[in-house]
Amino acid sequence: MRDKKLADVPEGTDNPLNAAVDARDRSVVQMATEAVKHKQCRLAFQPVMQAKPPQSVAFYEGFIRVLDETGRVIPAREFMPQVEHTPIGRDLDCIALEMGMRTLIRNPGIRLSINMSARSIGYARWSRVLDRFLKKDASLGERLILEISESSAMQVPELVVDFMDRQQAKGIAFALDDFGASNFSFRHFREFLFDAAKIDGQFIRDISNNPDNQALVRALIAVAREFEILVTAESVETEEDAKYLIANGVDCLQGFLFGAPSVSPPWVQEKPAKTGS
């Protein structure tokens, strides 16, 4: 029947919805595979601003992007969920780290954060990339921030704690990403010793008009303060939200209000056109 509910369609290989989802996922994985094979990957950079005047850039976050067959830039949310647990996902982690380290070498005046996961720690190639660049220039560690999500950190907490301890000795800072989004126990702050925490964007959007999120974010900020952790608010999109967050003690702000991620480095000033004499 035409009005048959989607929920009534039986699961299994004959389900056209499942077939369509499977086909889409295979297409996404193939696109990412081709991008890695042909080195069609980029980093997109987004500024993270200091909350206090003069609100200059504290650091930039580098997001991995791939190019499809038409050259269109594809954001990570469009492919990472399908590949993050595959060899291609690990390849993309390595590529993001290597591009990030090269960016730091070329631009000694910036700090940069790169996303990582617990699986990166146990992946020999990823570790070799990090070690190779630090051996070239040990000072790079002082300008590198590695972001790891709550859910990833809790997969193998002992491994993550040991890795952080070794790398922090080299000057690398660590940020807890998606703070508040999962069941991260506050007692773990004592074990992990994060340098920063980034409050998940779902609690930040329209916070100036949402009393529930206001209470939650104030609590998250208070917890971070107890452990002397720098607090960044993600997904800041309006002046009203920014003012609320600044008034309630966040250290940094990140979001479309200050700039969208761009594959064109935002710290590179466009040269003025020459005028005729």
Image (cartoon, rainbow, N blue to C red):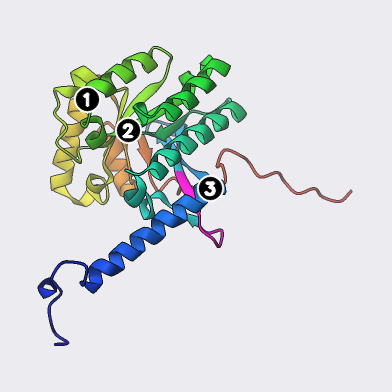
Viewer-nearest residue: 204 or 103: 103
Foreground disc of the pair 1, 2: 2
Give neighbour class at mark 3: few <14, some 14-19, many 20+ (Cα, 10 Å): few
Is residue 262 shown to the viewer in this render? no
Tell me the CA gap for discs 1 and 3. Answer: 33 Å
Give neighbour class at mark 2: few <14, some 14-19, many 20+ (Cα, 10 Å): some
Question: Range of the magenta residues?
Answer: 64-72
Which residue has dot 3 on it? 37
Query: In the image, is 268 to the left or to the right of 26?
Result: right
Which residue has dot 2 on it? 119
Secondary structure state at the residue bearing disc 3: helix
Pointers 1 and 2 in contact (C-beta within 8 Å): no
Residue 222 location (% of width, % of height): 18, 28
Tell me the CA gap for discs 1 and 2. Answer: 12 Å
Q: What is the three-letter code of the residue carrying label 1?
A: Pro
**Residue shown at 46% from the left, 56% from the top:** 31
Whether 214 is drawn above or below 134: the answer is: below
Which residue has dot 1 on it? 157
Is residue 1 shown to the viewer in this render? yes
Give neighbour class at mark 1: few <14, some 14-19, many 20+ (Cα, 10 Å): some
Residue 217 found in image quarter: top left
Magenta highlight on residue 66 = yes
Residue 190 location (% of width, % of height): 19, 18
Secondary structure state at the residue bearing disc 2: helix
Foreground disc of the pair 1, 3: 3
**Residue shown at 17% from the left, 45% from the top:** 213
